[in-house]
Amino acid sequence: MNYRQIVAEAWQFTQDNRRIALGYGAFPSIFTTIVGIGYIVYQYYSFASSKLFQHWDRSFLQIVFSTALEFLGAHRGFIVPLIVAAAILALCYFFVPVLCEGALIQLIARRRNGQQVQGRKGVTFGLMSFLPLFEYRLFIQTFSIFSIFSIVATSLRNLGWTALGIILPIFIIVLIAALFMAVCLTYTEFYIVIDGEGVFTSVAKSANLVVKHLEETLLLTILMLIIGVRIIIQILFVLLIPAIAIGVVYLLTLYNLPNLGLALGAGLGMIGVLVASYLNGIIHTFAIAVWTFTFLELTSMVESHARDKTEDQPQKDQGSKE
């Protein structure tokens, strides 16, 4: 299998199918980017308010909830719109990326095989594989890096620096186990979406395919270190978007222009979210294309058996020695 050719073809596919990348890659990234910003802000101020650093009188969550209650008490007309907006954001965050993931895999696989399918057909494909793919996402969420980091961060804030010597070795062991599991589950989503297999059947088949083609999977993973750029870009934007917006609001507030500061901060934040979502969507589509092409190649290979003979197999002597 030519790894470089697969990567090149996947990038060309991404360039030739920008509408798919925007519709099924960039669009769901809007919600994940917004939630990611909220997550980073929460972790930052939770550490800042904990006894590890500034040791505030109240925790960050207590301040947020009390401030929100005071604001809603003074502006009761915002209660219903904010609840509706929060519910829509939560639903979109949990469901839209899963639906778009199934749509992306199906569209990429079908166009790779020469089928002329329209981009809007991806919604149907995404709905067909939504439930098992959502079940799988819930299954692996416990072992994700963000989940592990959240548990470690919460433990560290509550127990203090003295617990670091105990938490760090456990964190390293769990992280290694999570990375090993991630490699074994590399092809699970593709078995679910392309072949219509169940979750646990797909998990078993993915682990079996990885074992059979361990070299190919690891080498392609090394070549796909470019995906690390996606993570770096996402982290940078997640950190820069609130920093720039808050900085603009703070500077203009110093000049007695708080309303203008809020407007400019909100505008810059929205632009940053859209740019980050676009870049993330392009790179995500490229990554899905690489692994979809790889999955199709590996599963189409004819496995040889130990009893299979090649053409140059030497013939046994038919006669017996006297």
Image: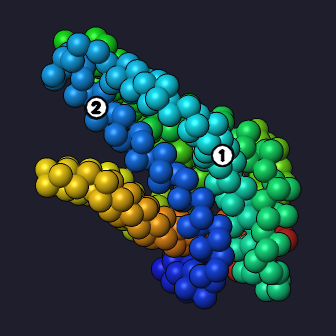
**Residues packed near mark 2 inside 10 Å, few (<14), some (14 to 19) or many (20 plus):** some
Q: Quadrant of the C terminus?
A: bottom right
Which of the pair 189/154 is nearer the observer?
A: 154
Q: Secondary structure at mark 2?
A: helix
Q: Which percent across, then down, holds residue 321? A: 78, 65
Q: Which residue is mark 1?
A: 88
Q: Which three-letter amino acid code belongs to the residue tagged 2?
A: Tyr
Between 11 and 86, the one nearer to me in the picture: 86
Amino acid type indicated by mark 1:
Ile
Numbered circle sitting on residue 277: none
Q: Is residue 125 visible?
A: yes
Q: Which residue is mark 2?
A: 45
Q: CA–CA distance between discs 2 and 1?
A: 25 Å
The answer to which quarter of the image holds residue 118 is: bottom right
Compared to residue 125, the image places residue 196 above or below, namely above
Quarter location, residue 204: top right
**Which callout, 2 or 1, points to the residue nearer the camera?**
1
Q: How many marks?
A: 2
Q: Quadrant of residue 106?
A: bottom right
Mark 2 or 1, nearer chain start: 2
The residue depicted at 49 percent of the width and 45 percent of the height is 35
